[in-house]
Image: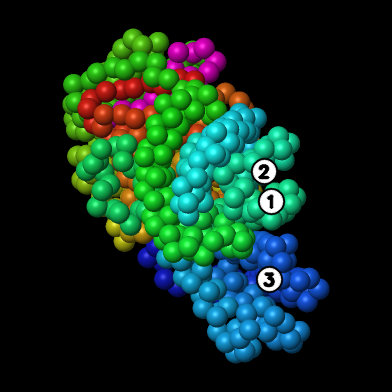
């Protein structure tokens, strides 16, 4: 007997009132948060006006104004509140008018000033909106990353010192900017964290100060003191980082969507990420350098456009070189030194894989579903059994206890529309025939009665929940087919929830049956999801991948971060890959790569010959350390290990 709870239309009066109060509370929270978030922009505006009123318009005051503007943009990216920059622009303009400082700033009328500031803030808001910039966050540098920045900053100093005697007229300064920017470009690509440019420029300035030497870069600021040069380096670095953050690294370039899914050589994908940074730096760094270099020749301004173009062109080979160094060397030294452990060939492509101790002997087995209609079980590299399930297996396997017994069971869906439950030896326990392709299967205690259920969904656009034996408890309809599902306590209340992704572009969280707790909407269908604690705070995060190319992380319904992968994530797993006690995210992606993330930070890339269709994390060789298992469309099962 099927009971589809979505068709229950007459809601109880208490539930209706509750929903109304939730809506009212939601709007109240929006208004309250906007007022709270607007306080800092107003304070920044007051600080900017105070600087203008009390200080002459010199290097320090100009730098402070730029610093406050950059801070405002980062604050906008952190809060993700639309219109905060416009709020600050209006307040800043009005305060300047009240303080009668606008003549000192630009010499325009107060109305012209308000117009100019509003236009500039609107441009920033529009770019942030169109590029779908992810939320800004700061992460600390590791010792190895600091070492890399010191090495490159010192290299920059030495090379510029060697060429300091070269004089090529008005082109000296443009080429100085180009060369120095290339060094910064390589440093930024290798480290890929906020503050890389700032830190490198400040290190460079301190090296000059301590050495008492003069380099080509000093030609930009011949009349400034050493402290002023360090301050200028700090402001230029912040501005460059601001531009990179605003255009949305790894988001804006995704408009080149015709190149995804392996239509061009894989290495080009990563280069697009670096080229975006390159063009950002090629425009922002030279322009900021000119802002402070007020003693340069007028002829220099005439060659400035050519300098920017040359800078952008120079970044192209540097970005390719930096990425090659990053992927082939630094990913294996600075981050996680993962290597391929072994590769096993199957008759056809690999559809699914999982790692679990299915016979309770203390040693893990790994289960592999192949397109030859067989399910294989291995232990220590040896095949234990294989089972003909009559059709191609679903991309997701459920392994665990079901019902009231302690037996580990394997549940798999098929392209033929069957849900099959097997024991640990591969013998049939029960089957359900739904008639349409089953895409996703998992096991978990959905109704929190202490007994695990089977959850399955596929091309019939319904998520089903079954008891052991195949009796359906309830189901929920979607507007399109089901792409993924998982069970975990995602709100930290001690009870499990069910999360489901669908081809209708929604990802939903259900509690106590079909009660929808929250949902997120994507640009295209939701392909995969995984649950686990990735920040060691004791709470479960939900990581979701979509064919729109985004990988997003949610905590209790709130988006923590997102990143964009050219080709899009198609398979996900969460586990402790580097055995440091903190879980990582492993994604199989459409550009034929396997990527490892710590939080939202990519720390390793492994390249495959074809698309990885499944990911599993576990201790395969039973040495106490986890491995990464993945299968590709070239019929290879591949194992990676730290």
The percent coordinates of residue 183 (x first, y second) are 51, 40
Residue identifier under label 1: 229
SS state under label 2? helix
Depth check: give the residue in front, 313 or 607.
313
- Nearer the observer: mark 3 or 1; the answer is 1
Tell whether 398 sits left or right of 14: left
Q: Are marks 3 and 1 in contact (CB under 8 Å)?
A: no
Q: Which stretch is magenta? A: 617-632
Q: Residue 229 at what x, y percent from top left?
A: 69, 51
Taking the magenta stretch, the answer to whether it contains residue 622 is yes
Q: Which residue is mark 3?
A: 41
Residue 288 place in picture, x, y as percent: 56, 59
Dot 2 surroundings within 10 Å: few (below 14), some, or many (20 or more)? many
Q: Nearer the viewer, mark 2 or mark 3?
A: 2
Q: Earlier in the sequence, mark 2 or mark 3?
A: 3
- Horizontal placement of 538 versus 130: left or right? right
Q: Nearer the viewer, residue 455 or 334?
A: 334
Q: Which residue is mark 2?
A: 205
Mark 2 to mark 1: distance in Å? 7 Å
Q: Indicate the secondary structure of the residue bearing disc 3.
A: helix
Is 563 in the magenta? no
Tag 2 and tag 1, C-beta contact below 8 Å: yes
């Amino acid at each position: 007997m099927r009971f589809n709870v979505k068709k229950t239309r007459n809601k109880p009066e208490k539930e209706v009132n509750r929903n109304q109060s939730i809506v009212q509370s939601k709007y109240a929270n929006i208004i309250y948060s906007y007022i709270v978030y607007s306080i800092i922009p107003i304070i920044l505006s007051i600080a900017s006006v105070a600087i203008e009123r009390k200080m002459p318009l010199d290097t320090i005051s100009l730098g402070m104004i730029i610093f406050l503007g950059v801070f405002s943009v980062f604050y906008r990216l952190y809060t993700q509140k639309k219109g905060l920059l416009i709020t600050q622009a209006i307040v800043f303009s009005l305060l300047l008018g009240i303080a009668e400082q606008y003549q000192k700033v630009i010499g325009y009328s107060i109305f012209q000033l308000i117009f100019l500031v509003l236009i500039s803030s609107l441009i920033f808001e529009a770019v942030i909106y169109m590029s779908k910039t992810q939320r800004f966050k700061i992460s600390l540098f590791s010792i190895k990353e600091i070492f890399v920045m010191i090495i490159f900053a010192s290299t920059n100093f030495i090379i510029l010192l060697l060429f300091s005697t070269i004089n090529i007229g008005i082109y000296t300064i443009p080429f100085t900017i180009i060369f120095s920017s290339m060094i910064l470009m390589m440093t930024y690509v290798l480290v890929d964290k906020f503050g890389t440019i700032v830190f490198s420029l400040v290190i460079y300035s301190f090296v000059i100060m301590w050495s008492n030497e003069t380099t080509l870069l000093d030609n930009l600021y011949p009349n400034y003191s050493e402290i002023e040069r360090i301050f200028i380096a700090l402001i230029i670095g912040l501005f460059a980082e601001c531009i990179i953050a605003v255009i949305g690294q790894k988001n804006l370039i995704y408009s080149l969507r015709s190149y995804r899914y392996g239509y061009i050589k894989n290495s080009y994908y990563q280069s697009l990420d670096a080229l975006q940074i390159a063009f950002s730096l090629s425009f922002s760094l030279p322009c900021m350098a000119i802002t402070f270099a007020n003693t340069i020749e007028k002829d220099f301004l005439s060659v400035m456009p050519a300098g920017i173009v040359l800078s952008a062109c120079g970044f192209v080979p540097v970005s390719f070189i930096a990425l090659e160094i990053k992927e082939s060397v630094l990913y294996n030294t600075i981050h996680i030194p993962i290597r391929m452990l072994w590769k096993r060939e199957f008759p056809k492509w690999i559809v699914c894989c999982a790692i679990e101790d299915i016979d309770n002997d203390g040693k893990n087995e790994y289960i592999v579903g192949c397109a030859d209609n067989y399910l294989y079980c291995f232990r220590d590299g040896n095949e234990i059994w294989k089972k003909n399930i009559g059709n191609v297996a679903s991309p997701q396997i459920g392994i665990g206890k079901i019902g009231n017994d302690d037996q580990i069971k394997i549940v798999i869906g098929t392209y033929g529309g069957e849900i099959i439950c097997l024991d640990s030896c591969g013998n049939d326990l029960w089957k359900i025939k739904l008639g349409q392709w089953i895409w996703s299967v998992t096991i978990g205690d959905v109704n929190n009665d202490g007994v695990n259920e089977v959850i399955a969904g596929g091309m019939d656009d319904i998520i089903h929940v079954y008891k052991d034996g195949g009796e359906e408890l309830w189901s929920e309809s979607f507007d399109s087919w089901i792409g993924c599902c998982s069970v975990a306590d995602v709100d930290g209340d001690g009870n499990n929830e069910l999360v489901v992704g669908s081809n209708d572009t929604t990802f939903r969280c259900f509690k106590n049956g079909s009660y929808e707790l929250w949902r997120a909407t994507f640009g295209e269908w939701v392909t995969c999801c995984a649950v686990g604690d990735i920040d060691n705070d004791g709470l479960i995060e939900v990581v979701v991948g979509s064919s729109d190319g985004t990988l997003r992380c949610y905590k209790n319904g709130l988006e923590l971060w997102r990143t964009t992968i050219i080709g899009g994530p198609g398979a996900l797993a969460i586990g402790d890959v580097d055995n440091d006690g903190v879980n990582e995210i492993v994604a199989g992606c459409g550009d034929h790569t396997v990527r490892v993330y710590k939080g939202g930070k990519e720390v390793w890339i492994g390249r495959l010959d074809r698309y990885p269709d499944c990911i599993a994390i576990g201790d395969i060789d039973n040495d106490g350390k986890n491995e990464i298992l993945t299968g590709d469309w070239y019929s290879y099962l591949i194992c990676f290990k730290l």
